[in-house]
Image: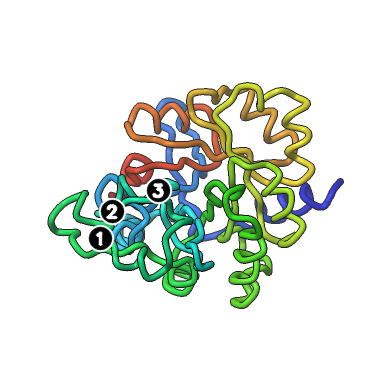
Amino acid sequence: MNRKLLAGASIAFTLLFSPLHQTFAHESTGDTRKVDNVAHRGASAYAPENTIAAFDKAVEMKADYIEIDVQRSKDGELVLIHDTTVDRTTDGTGKVGDLTFEELKSLDAGSWKGEEFTGEKIPTFDEILDRYHGKIGILIELKAPELYPGIEESVAQELKERNLDKPQNGKIIIQSFNFESMKLTNELLPNVPIGVLTGSPLDTTKEALEEFSTYADYFNPHYGIVTKDLVNQVHTLGMKISSWTVRSQEAADFLFEMGVDAIITDYPDYVDPRN
């Protein structure tokens, strides 16, 4: 059994008995199922994505994880924003990587969502680690890492400085659509769970899944390509499956039925009935 399979088994065992891991009843069959509730860019249906307001809301709504998007400023600061430009979610324009940290911090990242969020800022990666670690799990997505050579090392360094490169009961996970980036991250952080993101059925073949299982702990597909057979294949290979992005109760219910391990959602209340 390779290292990733052993790590995955250890993480699964730990999570099974973790009080932070929520248990939900599946009404149609009467069974219980453990599914992690991952707030996509924070509780982004209710507050501006990738901001303190959205992450605080996710904590308030009892999510198990916040999902964050990490990019890098022109002068090397790790910042949280989804798009590779600032145009959609701030009052600025331009590419993230062409703007300095001071320029990025001067932008209003909240008013587009509502007047009550005016003045929300683009957070930094270290700010989020310091504010939320120990309070909620953090699913770190490296967004377009091919645009930021060396970003894997920078993220690894921030985690190591806080001893977050050690086993954290699965509460720190790193994922990306860039598979080569995740292979490198796995080498840099061998004790941190790795996830691969995809929306392509081409990545669900037996051969592709076997390749992912050599370095990844999670296979994280768009819910449109999830089937029970895919879930079973992923589990057989020792990986877990987290699916995205849920924006309706119907989509959440479908993923419960499929037996996924985590649901990545803009609406944490669609996954956790306590809200």
Vertical relation: 273 (above or below) 102 = above
Labels 3, 1: front one: 3
Q: Earlier in the sequence, mark 1 or mark 2?
A: 2
Q: Nearer the viewer, residue 266 or 75?
A: 75
Q: Earlier in the sequence, mark 2 or mark 3?
A: 3
Taking the image as shown, residue 274 lies to the left or right of residue 1, namely left
Q: Secondary structure at mark 3?
A: loop
Q: Nearer the viewer, residue 218 or 6?
A: 218
Vertical relation: 273 (above or below) 135 = above
User: Which numbered disc covers residue 90?
Assistant: 2
Q: Position of residue 67 (x, y in %)?
A: 46, 52
Q: Position of residue 155 (x, y in %)?
A: 60, 64
Q: Nearer the viewer, residue 205 or 78?
A: 78
Residue at the spot 33% in from the left edge and 39% down from the top edge: 270
Q: Secondary structure at mark 1?
A: loop
Taking the image as shown, residue 32 lies to the left or right of residue 209, namely left
Q: Earlier in the sequence, mark 3 or mark 1?
A: 3
User: Which numbered disc covers residue 85?
Assistant: 3
- How packed mark 3 is, by other alpha carbons closer than 10 Å (few <14, some 14-19, many 20 or more), is some
Q: Nearer the viewer, residue 244 or 268?
A: 244
Figure coloring: rainbow
> Tag 2: residue type?
Thr
Residue at the spot 50% in from the left edge and 54% down from the top edge: 21
Q: Secondary structure at mark 2?
A: loop
> Tag 3: residue type?
Thr
Distance from disc 2 to disc 3, alpha carbons, whole Å, reads: 9 Å
Taking the image as shown, residue 89 lies to the left or right of residue 25, namely left
Taking the image as shown, residue 25 lies to the left or right of residue 110, namely right
- Residue occupied by mark 1: 108
